Amino acid sequence: MQQFENGISAGEIGGAVWRKSRHSNANGNCVEVACLSDGGVAMRNSRFPQGPALIYTREEIAAFFAGVKEGEFDSTLS
């Protein structure tokens, strides 16, 4: 099983199926995610599909989403 590290070129993640939210805008200002074979989650900027990917564990993603749902980041977006 391949191990992935932060900063790997998103183009080097073979077999990745990248997805973005249906709420993304037409200008391409989107974050895309892909599940990895090692159980991790990769994120990339949709405007630079061959650019670097950030790699997170499923637990890190779950903690982030929980914080978003609870409004922990609302004040940083205004």
Image (tube, grey):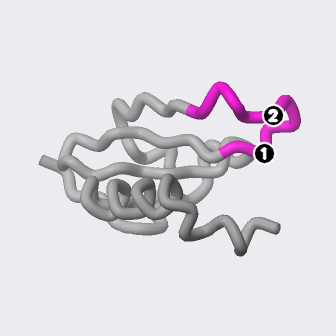
Q: Position of residue 14 (x, y in %)?
A: 36, 37
Compared across the picture, whether 17 is left or right of 2 comes to right
Q: Position of residue 44 (x, y in %)?
A: 57, 51
Label 2 with label 1: CB-CB less than 8 Å: yes
Farthest residue to the right: give it. 27
Is 13 or 43 nearer to us in this picture?
Answer: 43
Secondary structure type for disc 2: loop
Residue 68 visible in the displayed image: yes
Instruction: Report the magenta stretch's main SS.
Output: loop
Task: Look at the image and say whether residue 22 sits in the magenta stretch.
Answer: yes
**At 52% from the left edge and 58% from the top edge, which residue is drawn?**
68
Secondary structure type for disc 1: loop
* Image: magenta residue range: 20-30
Which residue corresponds to mark 2?
A: 25
Q: On screen, 59 above or below 26?
A: below
**At 12% from the left edge and 47% from the top edge, which residue is drawn?**
1
**At 65% from the left edge and 25% from the top edge, which residue is drawn?**
22
Which residue corresponds to mark 1?
A: 29
Task: Look at the image and say whether residue 24 sits in the magenta stretch.
Answer: yes
Compared across the picture, whether 61 is left or right of 23 comes to left
Compared across the picture, whether 2 is left or right of 76 comes to left
Tell me the amino acid under the disc marked 1.
Asn
Q: How many marks?
A: 2
